[in-house]
Amino acid sequence: MNIHKNARLTPLRREEMALAVVEGRLSKAVAARTYGVTAKVVGRWVERFLCEGSAGMADRSSRPKRSPKQTAAKVADEIAMLRRQRLTGKHIAKQTGVSAATVSRVLRRAGLSRLKDIEPAQPVRRYERDKPGEMIHIDIKKLGRFDRVGHRITGDRAGQSNSRGIGWEFVHVCIDDASRVAFSQILPDERQESAVGFLKAAVAYYESLGITVERVMTDNGSCYRSKAFARACRKLGLRHMRTKPYTPKTNGKAERFIQTALREWAYAVAYPTSAQRAAELPAWIHRYNWHRPHGSLKSQTPISRLGLTEDNLLRLHI
């Protein structure tokens, strides 16, 4: 049972109050003043206690025992059947002889108000490339700059608006589909020049780990649709793949990495300034790749999927 914040009586307090009146320790008027309710309320709980005992102190549903004007089950079933045939609410109302409001209520109860509710849920299709470098996912997260501890930590939004001119910074992220080895940089914008520069830096980073990148997947942002980005992909020998519009789950590994980065890096510490937050990013990326167990890798680290030799580990590990 959920007791609202202004509730005067809980079930235990109701029983305590009723017992005090029944046993003669308090009159109804005194009990009302003591427990902060009216004498009528005291009388109601005393009467219920005498009839039902402790079990009667619990809350009851306010739904009536009888609803003679409720839509018949046969009509409700017919409305649901017609809706599954993709008929509109007004069409169903005309065919069944009930009002459009009644049809709306029945469909809401049946969970069929929206047309997309009629379609069966699409199964989750998970995929993973066979070897590192076959495909990398790239995305961008926009974060506000700040010069003091932010409202996510203090809860105080006073003076936190970016209209003050502090501005934004853009976290460009990249994650390898097979190994989940990640790379990230904070750049001043999300224009084509920044996107191209980040792509080159990401490819160079993976090459330093012995990974040859073959494909890159992005969303349909303007910087990724630019001719400059297309030229960069051709020059680097990459096949550029873009997600279907309004389907972020296609690029889900990058989306999920962004969520992890926000939780464990961007919002994990009360950074005094955004500059200090940015300075912490390389160290966090290192922990993510080399030390953090990854849930989708059976609690192994992303770097473990590269099959590096001991000599390479000593050369690459910071």
Image (cartoon, rainbow, N blue to C red):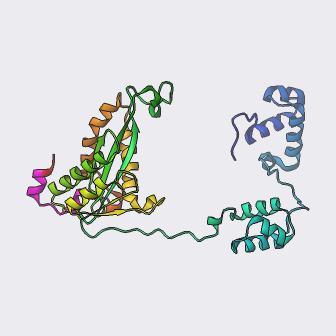
What is the x, y in percent for residue 172? Answer: 32, 47
Q: Residue at x 29, y 51 (%)?
A: 292
Q: Across the whole image, how many numbered discs are drawn on residues?
A: 0
Q: Does residue 301 sit above or below 264 in this rendering?
A: below
What is the x, y in percent for residue 26? Answer: 86, 29
Left or right, 219 with respect to 33, comes to: left
Instruction: Residue 299: say if magenta.
Output: yes
Camera-nearest residue between 226 and 1: 226
Quadrant the C terminus occupies: top left
User: What predominant SS class does the magenta segment belong to?
Assistant: helix
What is the x, y in percent for residue 61? Answer: 79, 51
Residue 142 falls in which quadrant of the image?
A: top left
Q: Is residue 229 visible?
A: yes
Left or right, 33 with respect to 173, comes to: right
Q: Residue at x 37, y 40 (%)?
A: 266
Instruction: Residue 252: say if magenta.
Output: no
**Stretch of the chain drawn in magenta:** 298-315
Camera-nearest residue between 207 and 219: 219
Q: Does residue 219 sit above or below 53 in this rendering?
A: below
Q: Residue furthest left?
A: 311
Q: Does residue 264 sit above or below 311 in this rendering?
A: above
